[in-house]
């Protein structure tokens, strides 16, 4: 349960069930991560399988925790990579098949909230099996044949936005009849309460005279944080005194730091790192920005809107389903120059900033009614 939008969306889903009507079993690969303690206690947490718990960890971490089978496969894949591409999904499925016994219960509905779906397909007995789409696969760089095979074994495919679903149907038209839309379910009370839990003025000083920009996400190619230093430089060149804070972690951190140095933004692009509770930082910022190359539907944008923050997103393929441009946020071009100009235009229009903020505070972004669609699947 790491600090990702998918994990936070899962928390909202689990909080939305009527536990007087439904028994909900939850199987997690690992019983750890900063969001693990936030899981609804009414959900029945099934026992952990250790080999899966450290599936994505390093070879040394696997050995340290006694995961010798997956460690052996990791070593095998490292050798294979020298000769041909390695499909991690196949390796993870191999570990799952070796270490997970079939689930003893029969279920009305089995939900795979994130790929791959081999576990619910092969180990779970259920009337209906459903898998989620959290991204736009047109731009993900994933092997589309692997994805096609994964989703084709499901009864229903759920996209987190209309455009995310349409994109999926364009790529896999033979699966179109199985696709439906269920928006991410989020808890406004949780977000707003968590925003009051911590004082972050030591990291984001309120009186330093700068406009505070914030972005949250994994430090990886889809989030486009490697271009933040260039965008920030352009905003400052336009005469705005901004500091851009980044919350997250991931494989691109070194690249981002290199870009910060390249554009001389050491004092103006600040990596805050991994935060168990990002909401006080959202509360402390002046503008939330999601500069992504592609998204399904970004949870962090919704959470910023819940806290009444003006938001800017780039014009990725599914951006139109994320917000109403000019009403509860602004969509800007993806390229660094266009992105910077769009941010400058918004920051210099105080009335528009205020209108967007007020609109966000007056809207319900929880999507709590979406649980009825899942209930409909169960009852049908």
Image: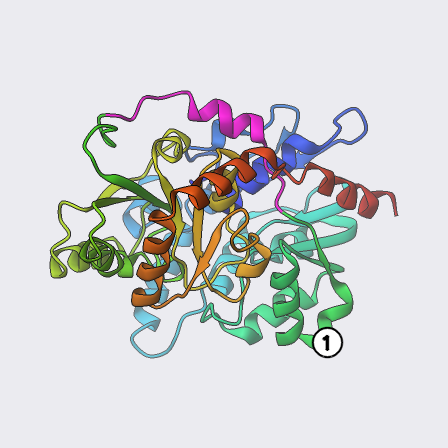
Residue 19 relative to residue 223: left or right? right
Q: Is residue 187 magenta?
A: yes
**Rendering coords of residue 264 (x, y %):** 11, 56
- Give the residues in magenta: 184-201
How many numbered discs, if any? 1
Q: Is residue 126 magenta?
A: no
- Residue 339 vs residue 225, the one in the foreground: 339
**Rendering coords of residue 307 (x, y %):** 48, 33
**Rendering coords of residue 346 (x, y %):** 38, 51
Is 199 placed above or below 244 here?
above
Q: Is residue 108 visible?
A: no
**Rendering coords of residue 318 (x, y %):** 55, 62
Q: Is residue 341 visible?
A: yes
Residue at position x 73%, y 54% in the image: 129
Please identify the quarter of the rendering in which residue 270 is found.
top left
Identify the residue position indicated by label 1 in the image: 174
Is 110 placed above or below 150 here?
above
Residue 331 relative to residue 204: left or right? right
Please identify the quarter of the rendering in which residue 93 is found.
bottom right
- Residue 309 vs residue 47, the one in the foreground: 309
């Amino acid at each position: 349960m790491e600090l990702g939008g998918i994990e936070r969306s899962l928390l909202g889903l689990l909080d939305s069930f009527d536990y007087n009507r439904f028994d909900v079993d939850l199987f997690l690969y690992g019983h750890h991560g900063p969001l693990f303690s936030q899981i609804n206690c009414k959900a029945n947490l099934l026992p952990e399988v250790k080999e899966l718990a450290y599936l994505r960890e390093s070879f040394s971490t696997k050995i340290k925790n006694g995961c010798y089978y997956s460690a052996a496969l990791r070593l095998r894949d490292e050798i294979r990579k020298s000769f041909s591409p390695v499909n991690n999904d196949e390796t993870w499925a191999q570990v799952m098949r070796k270490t997970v016994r079939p689930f003893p219960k029969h279920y009305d509905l089995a939900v795979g909230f994130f790929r791959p779906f081999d576990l619910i397909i092969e180990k779970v007995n259920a009337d209906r099996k459903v898998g989620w789409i959290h991204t736009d696969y047109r731009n993900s760089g994933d092997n589309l044949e692997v994805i096609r095979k994964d989703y084709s074994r499901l009864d229903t495919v759920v996209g987190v936005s209309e455009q995310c679903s349409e994109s999926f149907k364009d790529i896999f038209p033979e699966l179109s009849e199985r696709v439906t839309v269920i928006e991410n379910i989020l808890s406004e009370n949780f977000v707003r309460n968590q925003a009051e839990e911590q004082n972050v003025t030591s990291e984001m000083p309120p009186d330093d005279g700068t406009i505070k920009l914030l972005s949250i996400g994994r430090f990886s190619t889809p989030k486009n944080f490697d271009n933040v230093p260039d965008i920030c430089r352009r905003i400052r060149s336009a005469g705005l005194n901004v500091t851009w804070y980044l919350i997250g972690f991931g494989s691109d951190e070194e690249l981002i730091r290199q870009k910060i140095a390249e554009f001389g933004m050491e004092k103006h692009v600040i990596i805050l790192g991994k935060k168990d509770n990002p909401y006080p930082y959202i509360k402390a910022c002046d503008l939330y920005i999601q500069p992504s190359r592609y998204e399904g539907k970004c949870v962090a944008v919704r959470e910023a809107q819940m806290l009444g923050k003006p938001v800017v997103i780039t014009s990725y393929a599914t951006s139109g389903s994320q917000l109403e441009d000019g009403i509860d946020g602004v969509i800007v071009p993806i390229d660094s120059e266009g992105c910077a100009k769009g941010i400058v235009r918004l920051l210099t229009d105080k009335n528009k900033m205020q209108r967007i903020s007020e609109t966000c505070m007056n809207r319900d972004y929880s999507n709590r009614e979406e649980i009825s669609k899942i209930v409909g699947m169960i009852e049908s």
